[in-house]
Image (cartoon, rainbow, N blue to C red):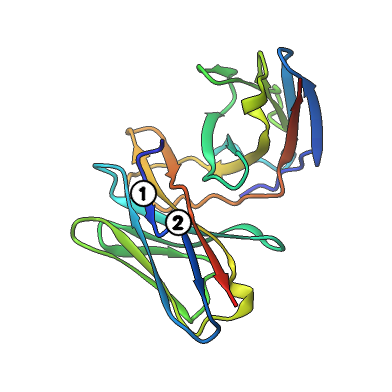
Amino acid sequence: DSGVTQTPKHLITATGQRVTLRCSPRSGDLSVYWYQQSLDQGLQFLIQYYNGEERAKGNILERFSAQQFPDLHSELNLSSLELGDSALYFCASSAWDSTQETQYFGPGTRLLVL
Amino acid sequence: DAKTTQPTSMDCAEGRAANLPCNHSTISGNEYVYWYRQIHSQGPQYIIHGLKNNETNEMASLIITEDRKSSTLILPHATLRDTAVYYCIVRVAPYSGAGSYQLTFGKGTKLSVIP
């Protein structure tokens, strides 16, 4: 158990719909990363937040957005869903020990768009 | 970040050492080698990292060649639970807790531990 929680575990929805994925980082971790894992693209970085502020963006579609709240949990919002958005979505929180940064991943949310 | 090359798959007998190679010939002086693994669609799990010296922890050992162009992850006594995809990732050295250090995953090596 990494200490990072994600809800829901599974999500089935239809094309055109909007969903929200939730991530709670490990206690004390300020940084949250979101990754998408699809069969054809592998694990790809989407976006990072640090202490409530967006810090970096990767291959995130304009239909996707995220935010990090004052209690440090984060949400990834996916809208106008397409079949190709079906994937595993992982969040990771980051631990910094003055010399190194290690990412701890949650169990993921499996999204199926029908 | 430097690109890495790993074999697509490997087999290892249970109880034997698993040696997973990684080539990173374009690595820069300020880049570390990290290893993560993913067990069957679970979230990736950190294993170990190193700069130029060999490293060991409770999970594995990391051997980095002197020229730093390649490395080997060693699982000393592989068990069935070590069956997973292993990712070798090269990344710049972190300098701040507020920095951005996203991981770039390749296809990794699928390790199958055989009973």
Report x, y in % for residue A27: 25, 42
- Of the numbered discs in the image, which one, if any, rests on residue A5? 1
Mark 2 vs 1: CB contact within 8 A = no
**Residue at image x 66%, y 40%?**
B27
Report x, y in % for residue B55: 56, 19
Find disc 2 in the rendering and name its residue: A9
Q: Amino acid at mark 1?
A: Thr
Residue A31 as seen in the image, left or right of residue B51: left
Q: Most extreme residue toward the left, as rendered?
A: A70
Report x, y in % for residue B14: 73, 17
Q: Is residue B101 above or below residue B15?
A: below
Q: Amino acid at mark 2?
A: Lys
Q: Is residue B23 above or below residue B14?
A: below
Question: Distance of mark 2 from mark 1, alpha carbons?
Answer: 10 Å
The quadrant where residue B25 appears: top right
A90 or B63, which lies in front? A90
Q: Quadrant of the N terminus of chain A?
A: top left
B98 or B109, which lies in front? B109
**Label 2 vs label 1, nearer the camera:** 2
Residue B11 as seen in the image, left or right of residue A29: right
Q: Secondary structure at mark 2?
A: loop
- Of the numbered discs in the image, which one, if any, rests on residue A46? none
Return the chain for callout 2: A
**Residue at image x 40%, y 60%?**
A8
**Residue at image x 54%, y 45%?**
B42
